Image (cartoon, rainbow, N blue to C red):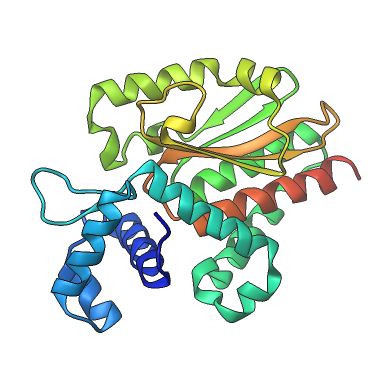
């Protein structure tokens, strides 16, 4: 199904509202945002649900995004990050002010020491503080993790089975990174796209960078599929860029 521009805008608005509120998004909220009737919004939401981009929880009249919905959204953000002109025409989507403050915080942390391992750990710790996700990075043959307790305070992880699925993913992440060596500067694995822990409903956002340990070093975050992708993707990519500059200076 080819989506109309309005359907894409409604889908993206639902994703952003759901990331903020952690509750299914209803037609009344969107009707006010788009200046149309609730009936019009409900009709569009039904089409998006039929196409597999939204799902309606049994206990709610609102909708939440599916992995496919998130993937369409993330692909749109990736295009925006590549096309600098889109940032100028739609600056709110990428939250430049918050991103800049976050970038400065990471830069201050990683530049305060003179060892590559310290810089990498500092960058991970900064990402944890800025995103509320679990932070991770490869340092040689080791996987450095921080923020596990913060990750599990998210409402998505009240279910023990999901926590166990995340734990399985983390247990196998370092050997998978070493074997698969994702080649893009920024790699995003959403929900069932993850190589391990497919039922954990998490997103893994990682940036590849060159370090004294390896040309395929990685830094990133792991969090629920419900998150502010625009900001997190930007921060992770900037962290990778800064580490490559600092660690190889």
Left or right of 176: which side holds 10? left
- Identity of the residue drawn at 69% across and 17% down: 179
Left or right of 85: which side holds 63? left
- Quadrant assignment, res 174: top right
Left or right of 44: which side holds 223? right
Q: In the image shown, does 66 or 172 lie closer to the viewer?
A: 66
Residue extending farthest to the front is: 1
Instruction: Tell me if I can see residue 112 in this picture.
Output: no
- Identity of the residue drawn at 34% across and 34% down: 152
Left or right of 223: which side holds 83? right
Q: In the image shown, does 228 or 140 lie closer to the viewer?
A: 228
Residue extending farthest to the bottom is: 35
Q: In the image shown, does 12 or 112 lie closer to the viewer?
A: 12
- Identity of the residue drawn at 55% across and 59% down: 77
- Quadrant assignment, res 199: top left
Instruction: Indicate the position of residue 222 as horizontal and vertical percent values.
Output: 49, 36
Instruction: Indicate the position of residue 104 as horizontal and vertical percent values.
Output: 66, 61
């Amino acid at each position: 199904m080819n989506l109309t521009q309005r359907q894409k805008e409604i889908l993206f608005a639902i994703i952003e509202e759901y990331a903020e509120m952690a509750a299914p998004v209803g037609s009344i909220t969107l009707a006010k945002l788009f200046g149309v009737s609730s009936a019009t919004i409900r009709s569009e939401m039904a089409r998006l649900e039929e196409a597999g981009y939204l799902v309606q929880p049994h206990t709610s009249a609102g909708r939440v995004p599916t992995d496919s919905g998130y993937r369409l959204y993330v692909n749109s953000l990736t295009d925006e990050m590549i096309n600098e002109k889109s940032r100028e025409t739609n600056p709110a989507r990428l939250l430049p002010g918050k991103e800049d403050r976050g970038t400065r915080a990471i830069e201050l942390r990683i530049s305060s020491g003179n060892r590559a391992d310290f810089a990498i750990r500092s960058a991970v710790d900064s990402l944890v503080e800025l995103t509320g996700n679990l932070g991770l990075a490869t340092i040689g043959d080791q996987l450095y993790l921080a923020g596990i307790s913060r990750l599990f305070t998210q409402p998505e992880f009240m279910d023990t089975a999901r926590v166990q699925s995340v734990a399985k993913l983390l247990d196998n992440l370092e050997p998978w990174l070493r074997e698969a060596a994702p080649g893009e500067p920024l790699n995003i694995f959403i929900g069932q796209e993850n190589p391990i822990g497919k039922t954990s409903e998490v997103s893994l956002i990682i940036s590849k960078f060159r370090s004294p340990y390896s040309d395929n070093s990685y830094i990133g975050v792991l969090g629920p599929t419900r998150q502010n992708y625009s900001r997190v993707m930007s921060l992770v990519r900037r962290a990778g860029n800064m580490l490559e500059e600092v660690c190889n200076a």
